[in-house]
Amino acid sequence: MNDPIVDEVRHIREAHAAMFNYDLDAIFRDIKEQEKMSGLKFVSYPPRRTEPNQALQPTGAALPVSQDSQSPEADPAADLSR
């Protein structure tokens, strides 16, 4: 399904990128320059801090998902109390 609005946006984006030989840095600089020349106020937020992922802790054996399913016996090699 073709959407004429999406097609038009893609055509304009392609033409703009071609003007700068698909150089992303040049495209970015041009967009920023257009923002300045527009006189509009653009909001910029500082980057969000991301916390490092905590290591997942083992939760034990999984429970059967139905009454018909069988839970395998624990592997004796997995016993850490030895």
Image (cartoon, rainbow, N blue to C red):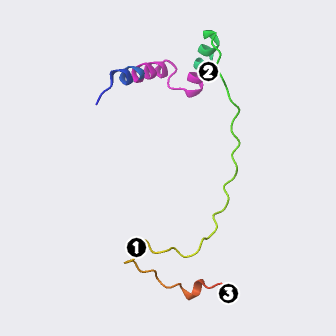
- Few, some or many residues within 10 Å of mark 1 (<14, 14–19, 20+): few
The furthest residue to the front: 67
**Element on which disc 3 rests:** loop
State the image coordinates of residue 13 (x, y, percent, origin top left): 45, 22
* First reached walking from the N terminus: tag 3 or tag 1: 1
Name the one closer to the observer, 45 or 33. Answer: 45
Q: Is residue 26 magenta?
A: yes
Q: Position of residue 25 (x, y in %)?
A: 60, 26
* Image quadrant where one finds the N terminus: top left
Amino acid tagged 2? Arg
Residue 29 shows which numbered tag?
2
Q: Residue at x 58, y 22 (%)?
A: 26
Residue behind mark 3 = 81
Q: Are marks 1 and 2 in contact (CB under 8 Å)?
A: no
Residue assigned mark 1: 66
Instruction: Tell me the magenta residue range.
Output: 10-29
Amino acid at circle 1: Ser
